[in-house]
Image: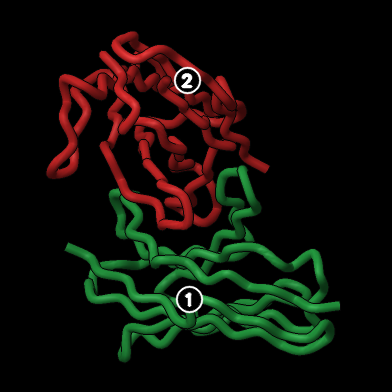
Chain colours: A green, B red
Amino acid sequence: GENVEQHPSTLSVQEGDSAVIKCTYSDSASNYFPWYKQELGKGPQLIIDIRSNVGEKKDQRIAVTLNKTAKHFSLHITETQPEDSAVYFCAASGNAGKSTFGDGTTLTVKP
Amino acid sequence: GAVVSQHPSRVICKSGTSVKIECRSLDFQATTMFWYRQFPKQSLMLMATSNEGSKATYEQGVEKDKFLINHASLTLSTLTVTSAHPEDSSFYICSARDPQALSGNTIYFGEGSWLTVV
């Protein structure tokens, strides 16, 4: 089955700096790569996603890049703000919709 | 955008009783829903895939007789934890796939349900 590895497990940045979280996957059939933000006590919220036919996608301060050959994808957050502090999960899924998640990254943005 | 509603958000039940959690897709029809379990400070682990009108598909190690899943309509899936024990206490989260989304198999999550078995 699919295996997703996510790094780093914790990340602390100063407000205004950029944050990068990286994930690798193993199943070449995976074609959908969402990123979720989870705040304490809540369910994961989709913040951005990318499909295997696209190399990069950007939405305001958030961007995701995908290297299908190397089977890795990354989340980039620029101009970080304290409200960006949360746990971020990457996931990989195929056409069936079943998602395999990374172990999560706890991002702390210091004011 | 698409919304998935989960209810209840928090539930406390006595050991040995059963508890039902509902997952609804509010503005799209979901032929497939997924149930996950998340322990504190851990990732989401898929428990089962809920298929409308047919039996759920359970992941290895998940007891189908303990975690009953019913997907009776295109907008509702339920997870029933039967004969609950304290070790079943966890955060249960559902997700639904929106096949009509521009992005194809975009998946949305409910807010999750905290189950505490005392």
The amino acid at mark 1 is Ser
**Which residue is at a point 31% across and 33% down the rendered structure image?**
B87
Chain of the residue under label 2: B
Q: Position of residue B70 (x, y in %)?
A: 31, 17
A62 in relation to B2, above or below: below
Q: Secondary structure at mark 1?
A: loop
The amino acid at mark 2 is Glu
A19 in relation to B36, above or below: below
- Tell me, yes or no, if residue A82 can be seen here: yes
Which residue was labeled with disc 2?
Answer: B22
**Which residue is at a point 37% across and 41% down the rendered structure image?**
B36
**Which residue is at a point 48% across and 48% down the rendered structure image?**
B107
Q: Position of residue B94 (x, y in %)?
A: 44, 36
Q: Quadrant of residue A29?
A: bottom left
Q: Residue furthest top?
A: B17
- Tell me, yes or no, if residue A32 can be seen here: no
Specify the label residue A9 is tagged with.
1
Residue B93 in the figure: left or right of residue A3: right
Q: Where the C terminus of chain B falls, by quadrant?
A: top left
- Whether residues under marks 1 and 2 lie with C-beta atoms below 8 angstroms apart, the answer is no
Residue A52 in the figure: left or right of residue A63: left
**Which residue is at a point 38% across and 61% down the rendered structure image?**
A101
Q: Position of residue B108 (x, y in %)?
A: 53, 44
Q: Where the N terminus of chain B falls, by quadrant?
A: top right
Residue A81 in the figure: left or right of residue B111: right
Q: Secondary structure at mark 2?
A: strand
Alpha carbon distance from label 1 to label 2: 32 Å
Q: Quadrant of residue B79?
A: top left
Q: Nearer the viewer, mark 1 or mark 2?
A: 1
